[in-house]
Image (cartoon, rainbow, N blue to C red):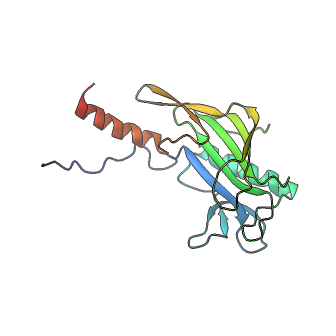
Amino acid sequence: ESYEFEGIKASPCQFGYRNKMEFSFGDEYKDGPLSLGLHKKGSTYDVLTASDCKLVHPDMTAILSSVLDFFTELGAVHYKKMQHTGYLRHLLLRRGVTSGEILVHVITTSQAEYDYPLEGKIVGIMHIINDSLSDVVQSDETRLLYGQDYFYETLLGLRFKISTFSFFQPNSLAAEVLYSIVRDYIGD
């Protein structure tokens, strides 16, 4: 079969496009201050605070900074993978691009309402307990602390209900571009 390559289709949004992000609690160096962000390249231990991540909406950055400040003031400790001790594991954020609705999930071990200047609106906060030895976001137990455990996103006029572990394309606007192309090929 022959086909015509039409090139790569760009997302309408180059930056701040992700509707889901998992950040890790840790320290930037052994026994350093609490950090919250992404693992340093080549390291499964060192975590760099992602206070200027270009992949996420500024709302997510604001929440990340506030959560880090809150737990730093509390003196909370991050989970240490080798020793299997500590409390804070991950911060999972989901944000509807079209609705601006935000879900905030704090993932901790079982060992132990804020005012943010955001464009979107936080519609749910969950506390997820994870005592697994593996370094993944999963839930042994989920406690709804505030609001609801889902938000809505709209793609091509269709409304989707998205919860914490729903599979959904992390770049909503790029998905809409691709689905539009497919729809044009098959017709309405």
Q: Which residue is drawn at 67% across and 58% down?
A: 24
Q: Which residue is drawn at 69% across and 44% down?
A: 105
Residue 62 place in picture, x, y as percent: 68, 47
Give residue 54's quadrant in the image: bottom right
Residue 157 place in picture, x, y as percent: 42, 25
Give residue 89's quadrant in the image: bottom right
Residue 52 place in picture, x, y as percent: 61, 56
Residue 72 place in picture, x, y as percent: 82, 57
Residue 119 makes an appearance in the image: no
Q: In this view, does 11 lie to the left or right of 151?
A: left
Residue 84 makes an appearance in the image: yes
In the rendered image, the residue lying farthest to the left is 2
Instruction: Tell me the quadrant of the picture where the C terminus can be found.
Output: top left
Q: Is residue 154 left or right of residue 84?
A: left
Tally of numbered discs = 0
Residue in the foreground of this view, choosing between 22 and 37: 22
Q: Is residue 183 above or below residue 54?
A: above
Q: Residue at x 84, y 55 (%)?
A: 111
Give residue 26's quadrant in the image: bottom right
Q: Is residue 71 left or right of residue 154?
A: right
